Image (cartoon, rainbow, N blue to C red):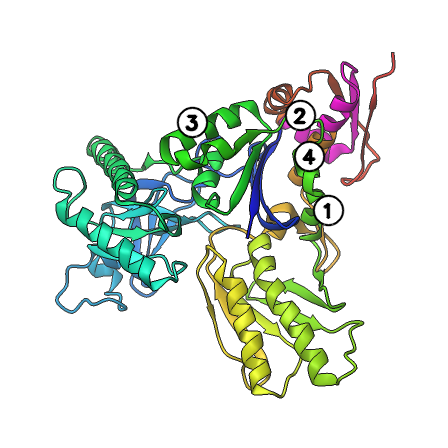
Amino acid sequence: MAQDVLINVGAGETRVAVVADGRLEEFYLERTIGPNALGGRAGRSLLGNIIIGRVQRVLPGMQAAFVDVGLERAGFLGAKEARCLADLPSFHEGAAPCISKLLLEGQALLVQVVKDPIGDKGARLSANVTLPGRLLVFVPNQRGLALSRRIEDEAERARLQAIVERLIANGEGRFITGAGYIVRTAAVGRDEAELAEDAERLAEAWRALALKRQGAHPPATLYYDLDTVERTLRDFVDDETGRVLIDDPDAFAQAKAYAARAMPEAEARVTLHNGPDFLFDLYDLEPQIEALLRPRVGLRCGGWITIETTEALTAIDVNSGSLTDTTGLEETSVRTNLDAAAEIGRQLRLRGIGGLVVIDFIHMGDPENIACVLQTLAMGLGRDRVPTQISCFSEFGLVELTRKRTRDPLLKCLTEPLEGCYGGRIKTVETLGCEVLRRLEREARARPGRALTVCVGPELAGWFGENAASIEEALRRRGVARYVVDRRESWPRMRHDIAEQRS
């Protein structure tokens, strides 16, 4: 499926959108202003960072340990994620030895962040660190070779396996001995020279990390994963990508440099977007993003699904709505369920929903129809970069699936519970602040050279005041230089306005 990748480097956040056939297929954002900006460097996610930490507490009853990684809260390391440390006769794949046999309190330990801090929980950690490249993933603590499950062609799998096995066997001095590799989907069609170059790059990165480790005092971050722009190119750009559009000159230059270094075949597709339209307006993405905050999602057949997330799980209800098939109830159910199954995978990706998901499809009696719906659901989830598992229909007509949690869901990132309204939510001050910055940029472009007044309520005025220096610098980079903030005491959080300054 042909797709375009759009990177919007705004004043308050960086947003990444993958669009296919005019529809939003992937969406990701990182805040760069405000207290809810993620840790790491310049507001980046911590995901993928490798840290030399120190074990604070070992809890055999939980089969877990807490590790100080230099954040407000200690990171959580489960026995399953620490089993690569085991050197026990009884240890075998699929079982985790007692955590107390793996770790000691006070021990220095190399760990990697596999899930960002979410709410009041610290980062999730793994002792089985990996270094992702463009084509390969380097796994220093495990021997052997694995291939991405998304590489389905058996002949291509055999070809890639043979190439990487040769590299491992003949790579003395160039590569790291005694380590393993995972072949990524992007490796499909690549030749031995390209794979060797990626492996050498990963070996250099690991040697540099090992050198840092020698003089490091825990807790200390030894390796930062790529920033948002480079990580987008590495993870989202493939042979099906038509264009990579970036609306910031500095980010564009960074992307071109990374592409030239790591993926030269894609360099020509990286393009600077400098208007006159705003980048996300090319595909009318703002309404599509706003719709991700609503529980109800319309289906092409006229039905809809309703998505409700609780602390324990996410429930999805399928409704046929206005669809009534003239051939009977079973046909109506099948058609609605097929549309729902195709849409659910997309919605889970876009909304960043993880954990347990329970789907209440419309009842069907024909086993072939049931199998067809499950196959459609599996195909939709098969495009997901996050691991998922699907059950069959239960006795009560429900389908359960799990999707690995790696970050807060979009709804939780952009909204918070509305006080005094059970189940209601309201956009956070940071979310509204970023919306105001985007609108301010639009107004400044529409009225070049004019001084603007931003009228906001007390909560937004406080956010502007607390982050004044960062906001001013970010807006100047986006071409907004003349503005003032006018605090309106009686205005609620959601209300804001922008007008020209009166002389």
Q: Residue at x 48, y 66 (%)?
A: 402
Out of 112 and 362, give the one closest to the viewer. Answer: 362
Q: Residue at x 21, y 35 (%)?
A: 207
Indicate which disc residue 465 carries: 2
Query: Mark 3, mark 2: which one is toward the viewer?
Result: 3
- Where does label 4 land, which residue? 433
Task: Check disc 3 and give the amino acid type.
Answer: Ala
**Residue 485 location, x and y as percent?**
75, 23
- Measured Cα–Cα span from mark 3 to mark 2: 36 Å
- The earlier-in-sequence mark between 3 and 1 is 3
- Measured Cα–Cα span from mark 4 to mark 2: 11 Å
> Left or right: 116 with respect to 425?
left
**Residue 302 location, x and y as percent?**
76, 67
Mark 3 and mark 4 in contact? Answer it, CB < 8 Å.
no
Query: Mark 3, mark 4: which one is toward the viewer?
Result: 3
**Kind of element beneath mark 1:** helix
- Is the residue marked by circle 3 packed among few (<14), some (14-19), or many (20+) residues within 10 Å? some
Task: Check disc 4 and give the amino acid type.
Answer: Gly
Residue 446 drawn in magenta: yes
Query: Mark 3, mark 1: which one is toward the viewer?
Result: 3
- Where does label 1 land, which residue? 287
- Measured Cα–Cα span from mark 2 to mark 1: 29 Å
